[in-house]
Image (tube, coloured by chain):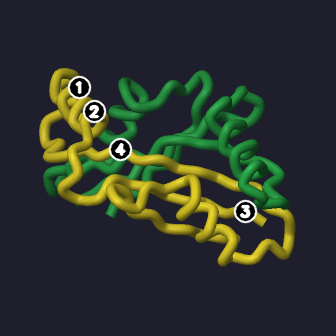
Chain colours: A green, B yellow
Amino acid sequence: MKAIISVMLKNGVLDPQGEAVKSALGSLGFDGVNGARQGKLIELNLADGTDPADVTEMCKKLLVNEVIESYTVDIH
Amino acid sequence: MKAIISVMLKNGVLDPQGEAVKSALGSLGFDGVNGARQGKLIELNLADGTDPADVTEMCKKLLVNEVIESYTVDIH
């Protein structure tokens, strides 16, 4: 089974990578980019039967800094 | 409108970040993590009416290195 974890900085948290993307797209002539934010995408290849609660635990313990980041988990 | 761009390293391309995640999860006692890969998630806030072809162009010109990365675009 696979777990896809999407991690984004919370709204209001400064995102220099996103700002750099926005400004670079503007320099390349792409108008209409009002904002850009960049996050992480983690794809875990898990043994069958892994408890989904374990994935949440992995996020809380290692993969996500819940103070500044929000995340979603998609297991299939 | 929003565009969510998911960028992952192609299969076969060495992914040190993913390897680090896998090994760290193992050290924390999470068994059954057979593999981990880490990619980027870019969220663009676009002016209404932006041509979806423009988003593909942004990916090709700036956001994605198509030699080693694959990507998907989700516009809504």
Q: Which residue is mark 4?
A: B38
Which disc number belongs to residue B2? 3
Quadrant in the rendering for residue A59: top left
Using the numbered discs, state the Cα–Cα distance from disc 4 to disc 1 in whole angstroms. Answer: 13 Å
Tag count: 4
Chain ID at mark 3: B
Chain ID at mark 1: B
Seen in the picture, residue B75 relative to B12 is either above or below; the reply is below
Q: Earlier in the sequence, mark 4 or mark 2?
A: 2
Look at the image and tell me in which quarter the N terminus of chain A lies: bottom left
User: Circle 1: is it few (<14), some (14-19), or many (20+) Cα within 10 Å?
Assistant: some
Look at the image and tell me in which quarter the C terminus of chain A lies: bottom left
Q: Are marks 4 and 3 on the same chain?
A: yes
Using the numbered discs, state the Cα–Cα distance from disc 3 to disc 2 in whole angstroms. Answer: 29 Å
Q: Earlier in the sequence, mark 4 or mark 3?
A: 3
Which disc number belongs to residue B24? 1
Using the numbered discs, state the Cα–Cα distance from disc 4 to disc 3 in whole angstroms. Answer: 22 Å
Mark 2, secondary structure of its residue: helix
Amino acid, disc 1: Ala
Between circles 4 and 1, the one closer to the viewer is: 4
Q: Earlier in the sequence, mark 4 or mark 1?
A: 1
Q: Residue at x 44, y 50 (%)?
A: A73
Using the numbered discs, state the Cα–Cα distance from disc 1 to disc 2 in whole angstroms. Answer: 5 Å
Which disc number belongs to residue B21? 2
Between circles 3 and 1, the one closer to the viewer is: 3
Amino acid, disc 2: Val
Using the numbered discs, state the Cα–Cα distance from disc 3 to disc 1 in whole angstroms. Answer: 34 Å
Quadrant in the rendering for residue A55: top left
Amino acid, disc 3: Lys
Q: Earlier in the sequence, mark 3 or mark 1?
A: 3
Q: Residue at x 78, y 51 (%)?
A: A26
Question: Pointers 1 and 2 in contact (CB under 8 A)?
Answer: yes
